[in-house]
Image (tube, helix red, strand yellow):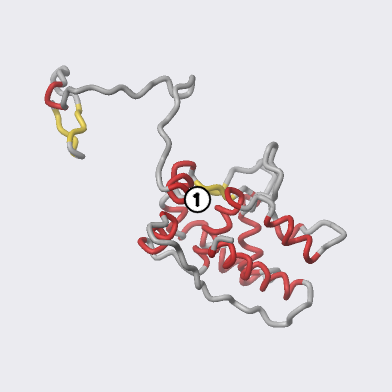
Amino acid sequence: MESWIRFLDMVITARLDVEFGKKEVLEKPKATITFDANDPLGEFVKKWDIKNQDLVLLSLALLPHMAPGFLDKKIADYIPKGGDFPEFGGIRAKNHRGIIPTGETLLYILAGNDSLVRKKYLSIFRESRLFQMGVICLGTTASDEPNYSGALTVDEEYAEKLLLGGVSKPRMSTQFPAQQIETLLKWEDLVLPDKTPILSSGRLRIG
C-alpha cells in the first residue's frame, strides 16, 4: 500500500474511532509519508510543501484513482451490516463503483460533527494552494444541493503527472480537432503576417 494511502487510512480511522465510540479522544496522526526516489507525487509534495489538511485533501482526491474500493471497505469495518452514513458524504458515479469523496467527506474527516470546527475548515476551499493552482476542484452541484456535496476531483493533467510522471499526448477528436506534426523546420522558418503573436523560446514576440 502506498504510504500516502496508509496516512489517509490512519486519519480516517482516528475520526471513525471517535465517531463509533472506540476512543474518546481524537488522535491526529503525524504525516510520516515516504516516497520512492524520483516519485512525481513525492516531488510535488516536497516542492510545494504540502502538509496537514492539504495533504489529507490531496490524498483523498487521488484515492479513487489508486484505491477505488477503499472508502467502501473502511466504512464497512464500522458498519458491517450496512446502513446510511450521511455525515461522511461521498457520491456514486455512473461507471465508478466506489465512493467518490466530496467536500463533505473532507470536512467530516477534518472536523467530525463539530459545527464550529467544521466552519473553521471551510476556508480550505478558498485558501488551499491545491484549489488555487487548479490541482483539485470541487464539482458543481444542483441548485438545491449544498456546494460542498460536490465531488473532489484532481485535474486530469495533474493526475497523470502525479501518478505517472507525465502527460499523455492529446488524441484527435471532435472536441480536439488537431493532431501533432513533425518537421525539420525551425521557428525562424515560420512565415506569418505582420503583427502576429509568436511564442518563441517561452517568450511572446510580435512578428
17 up-or-down from 56: above or below: below
**Camera-side residue of 179 and 119:** 179
User: Residue drawn 76% across and 57% down?
Assistant: 86
Q: How many marks?
A: 1
- Counting from the top left corner in percent of width and height, residue 205 is at 15, 33
| Image-based side of 14 in relation to 197, left or right | right
Q: Residue at the spot x=50%, y=50% of the render?
A: 136
Dot 1 crowding, Cα within 10 Å, few <14, some 14–19, many 20+: many
Look at the picture and state if 198 lies above or below 114: above
Q: Quadrant of the C terminus?
A: top left
- Which residue has dot 1 on it? 136
Task: Give the residue drawn at x 75%, y 61%.
Answer: 75
Under circle 1, the secondary element is strand
Q: Quadrant of residue 169?
A: top left
Which is more toward the observer, 156 or 134?
Answer: 156
Q: Is residue 181 left or right of residue 34?
A: left
